[in-house]
Image: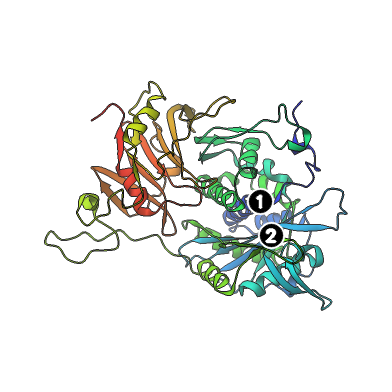
Amino acid sequence: MSYDPYEDDDFPRRARTGTWLRFLFAAVLIIVLTAGATATAGLLNVQKFVDDLKAGGTIRGAERVITRADVGDPQTILLIGSDHRYDAARRDARSDTMMLVRIDPDAAATTVLSIPRDLRVTYTDAQGLVHGPAKINETYTVGGEALTAEVIRTLFRIPINHIANINFRGFREAIDAIGCVYVDVDQRYYHSNIGLAASQQYAEININPGYQMMCGTRALDYVRYRHTDSDLVRGARQQDFLRQIRSQYDANDFVNDPHKLTKIIGRRMQTDKDLQSASALIQLAQLVAFSASKPIQQVAITPTYTTGSDGASYVEAGESEIARVREEFLHPDAAPAPPRQQRSGGGKKGRGRRSRAARSPSAPTPESLGLYDMTQTGKDYTIQLGPMNFPVYYPRYLPNSAGYMTPNTGAEGGYPIKYKTKAPDGKMKQSYRLVVSYGDPGNYMGVQGTTWKNPPILNNPSSDHRTINGKKLDLYYDGRRLRLVAWRTPQAVYWISNTLEKRLSNDQMLAIAGSLTRLGGR
């Protein structure tokens, strides 16, 4: 009988809640506040939302560290999640997740900053005692949410306007409340406990790559997966999941039952007292409403790992790194503007290249971009899909000469994969997925084809389009970095997905997409 970690709070020796909570926190914030924005016309409805938020309790001492924002000003929310060590007293809690979310209608994006729980800090508690060097998650054990907020505010010099501490147990209920989510899965996530000793067992998972619909338990399996990649990759995967929820979620779903989700989340979340008021909720919800068209942009600390004299492992971030993170968080970059067209007689070149730049002598060649000509390998690999009801395309160029993932042995499924996706209208759409390893752990490039011509992932492309080798390409950015390049045909749509950490450069993404070649064609 396989072990079910979701039914046992002690699995295996510590609650495995921290890394995937980042997704839950940001998703809850976006969804609940968007729902609140639909209710701002009626004070009675707003008050019901406030009552839902009060159900989980109030954070003590928060008023000492939060800054009240003026009406219309941007706001920063600190989201905290905590767990307890196996057999530890309930008071021995540590914040395994700390995340700042910045909502600013005037900025280019809504920014999300995940703070590593092992970040090395020195801090002073409420009694004046100095602690350090210490991991930042220990501040929660010593002084609760208020001390954690004080240390983060001081370290990053970012005012905090609200604090929320959310319990992870409502995750599946929340996903069910908003419906399922379509997700672009980058690789095969598989683990079975059959034949393994209890000490080697962890959450079982079996999710194939490709664009697909996920509901409660499968979504939980996906976002909490943590065993073969780094914390940075997990964070990137959760942020991408959040992006998909935000692009697909319709606040109008709350019109008939506006408290379906807030009742679930309310009893599992503590907030500062100021947020538990109708005026504060309306103010924050309006910011979310005005920011609805803005993308979500992740800001990440570039970690340096060290070992302290106490033998503990720390994440170090110097003053210059903190300054860079602060600047990106408060002032995110906008997506690049469309490149200027060159005149036939020459002239200055814009930062981008016009559609035929890929063939111009001055354009970088695929080889100069670190790409490999894998035409024959691509043919051989794609043939494994077998007959398809629509044209199959594969890229001639790849970032890794041994990049195509081979079938998973010992488990059903593998690479490449053909399957059917169920669209919202109930119709099944034929699809395929090619998976390419970038070479770094947890980073995979995807090649997707599907007869579903308007999947949610392709909503709202950038105004920046390119035409390469006769293909008009739609571009999708995260800040100034391409995360997706798509090509539409009368029969199907195709796209190239960047790795979760966006390791491929913009020029590499464009060159790979432009090299898409029809199987069996010339």
Q: Which residue is mark 1?
A: 19
Q: Residue furthest top?
A: 387
**Residue at x 42%, y 63% (from the top left corner):** 334
Let me know if residue 68 appears in the view: no
Q: Is residue 383 above or below residue 254?
A: above
Where residue 267 appears, as percent x and y from the top left, is 76, 51
Looking at the figure, which quarter contains the N terminus? Answer: top right
Name the amino acid type tagged 1: Thr
Residue 460 falls left or right of residue 307: left
| Closer to us: 400 or 231 | 400
Name the amino acid type tagged 2: Arg
Where residue 406 appears, as percent x and y from the top left, is 48, 31
Secondary structure under tag 1 reads: helix
Residue 35 falls left or right of residue 513: right
Q: Is residue 318 above or below residue 226?
A: below
Residue 117 badge: 2
